[in-house]
Amino acid sequence: MSFQLPWQLRAEFARRLSQMYGREVPAYTTLVEVSEEVNQDCMAAAGTQAERLGSIQRVTAERHGAIRVGSRDEMSQAARVFAAFGMHPVGFYDLRDASASSVPVVSTAFRPIDPEELARNPFRVFTSMLASDDPRFFSEGLQARLSSFIGDRTIFPAELLELADRAAAGEGLPDDEAQQLLELATGAFELSSDPVEHSWYRELEEISAVAADIGGVSTTHINHLTPRVLDIDELYRRMEARGITMIDEVQGPPDWGGPDVLLRQTSFRALDEARVFRFEDGTVGPGDLRVRFGEVEQRGIALTPAGREVYDRMMAEADQRAADQGMTRVEAAQEVWAENLPRTEQELALQGLACFTFRLADGDGPSAARAESPESLSLRQLVQDGTVIPEPIVYEDFLPRSAAGIFQSNLQSAGSRDDALKGTDYSIEVMSEIVGRPVADPYELYLAQQADSVAQLERVLGIPIDPDLGRETTP
Ligand code: OOG
Ligand code: NI
């Protein structure tokens, strides 16, 4: 009997979720079709250059999902399920303050960490937990009712958790158990046909539509599944041409003619979905809810912490300029980007703004770099004289402001939040306690990958390399 490795389980899990979600939300299938067309056209136009940030096989299969859970227990169970698929918590996102509307959640993303695992299948799931203990959103009485409602439900059955723990410990499962794991895990994210208690749902919705979507129903579900495109502006135009209205603009960096960094995302509102309600008078009948949507993204180069600071400053500057000069945020961002970011990958590397791996230029054997047999080499010099080529590391994570924008674009009302009260403290440390394992810092992962590649280069060349790109060498 065959044995399924974590990456095989992960690829199959993503495929099954995609099939299920396509049946549930037909517009998603259109989005995937248009994304595939755009990617093929990019490949036809740019050839292998289009694959600089990931092979076409990887990008075509690439998805991120979003789910929302109601309590610390559910969050820790979600972590156990994802561990079976080689998906580990990375990054902490506090969306409670990142958004003008009421979005009472804190989040992390479960994803593969090793570069080889990412290349095999990069499936990631943005996972949000209701901060039901935050008094700015929930009164004491409501907190108690929420935790009893959520405490009474089971979104991950015991058999699923037990299989998941075994898969994580044994790094995979024999085929028959793998099938069972996949079926139960996919089923846990299916939209439920259980009746929704109408008055409870509406009570929570007054505070936050996100709180109602999480705490007002008896299960969880995939909120969206997001394909990756190589040209999000082209995707946007083609979706509009098909009559699907997208949100006003692409979130994150603008289209500006230089290297793409971090993450660009856009979305469209899904239609109302039929659900069954139990009304106040005890009758059960149809109704509808609008909580899910379609989203698409284009991924760029990971930034260093210094680069991320520049990004945050540029975003603030673009907002200011848009407000002062009556232009759109995207127009303002295009100007700000052109003024602040270098136009080439090589300059991004030399200014220490983005993360790269380094390889010897084709045809340049170790001897070329060693011609003068120095005692050490400078990475800066090697990159400047073209001996070493920086290859971009793709950004595998999310952006809190874009995430808040995505949550918000889907809300019909702002909900309520009492800013006079103090919110509960959450942090990456608290999230690590909740999920029962350390939540990795994305920037540490990118920098470690960059450092590994310099170490590899040192081994190939047999000479120590000064990795400080910012240090000018004396000629
Ligand atoms: C998650 C929203 C965040 C993204 O791509 O930034 C997100 C949600 O709506 O549950 O998915
Ligand atoms: Ni998303």
Image: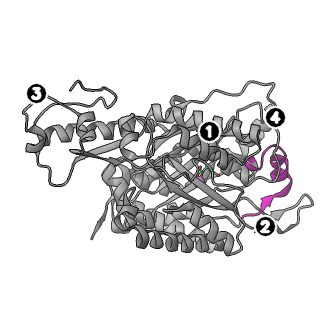
Badge 2 marks a residue whose secondary structure is strand
Q: Assign the N terminus to one quadrant of the image.
A: bottom left
Disc 2 residue type (three-letter)? Val
Distance from Cα at disc 3 to Cα at disc 4: 70 Å
Instruction: Say few, some or many: other residues with alpha carbon within 10 Å of mark 4 (under 14 / 14 to 19 / 20 or more).
Output: few
Residue at 7% of width from left, 38% of height from top? 371
Distance from Cα at disc 1 to Cα at disc 3: 43 Å
Distance from Cα at disc 4 to Cα at disc 2: 27 Å
Q: Point out the frontmost of discs 1 and 2.
A: 1
Query: Residue 333: percent from the left, percent from the top?
Result: 62, 44
CB within 8 Å, label 4 to label 2: no
CB within 8 Å, label 3 to label 4: no
**As displayed, is residue 372 above or below residue 405?**
above
Numbered badge on residue 375: 3
Single out the residue that lies furthest toward the front: 475
Numbered badge on residue 276: 2
**As displayed, is residue 326 above or below residue 160?**
above
Is residue 466 at all visible to an observer of this figure?
yes
Q: In this view of the protein, which residue sits in the foreground, 77 or 135?
A: 135
Magenta residues span 194-211
Q: Point out the frontmost of discs 3 and 2.
A: 3
Query: Residue 410: percent from the left, percent from the top?
Result: 73, 55
Task: Verify whether residue 116 appears in magenta.
Answer: no
Q: Which residue is mark 1?
A: 315
Q: Which residue is mark 4?
A: 141
Instruction: Say few, some or many: other residues with alpha carbon within 10 Å of mark 3 (under 14 / 14 to 19 / 20 or more).
Output: few
Q: Point out the frontmost of discs 1 and 4.
A: 1
Label 4 vs 2, first from the N-terminus: 4
CB within 8 Å, label 1 to label 4: no
Disc 3 residue type (three-letter)? Glu
Residue at 37% of width from left, 47% of height from top? 393
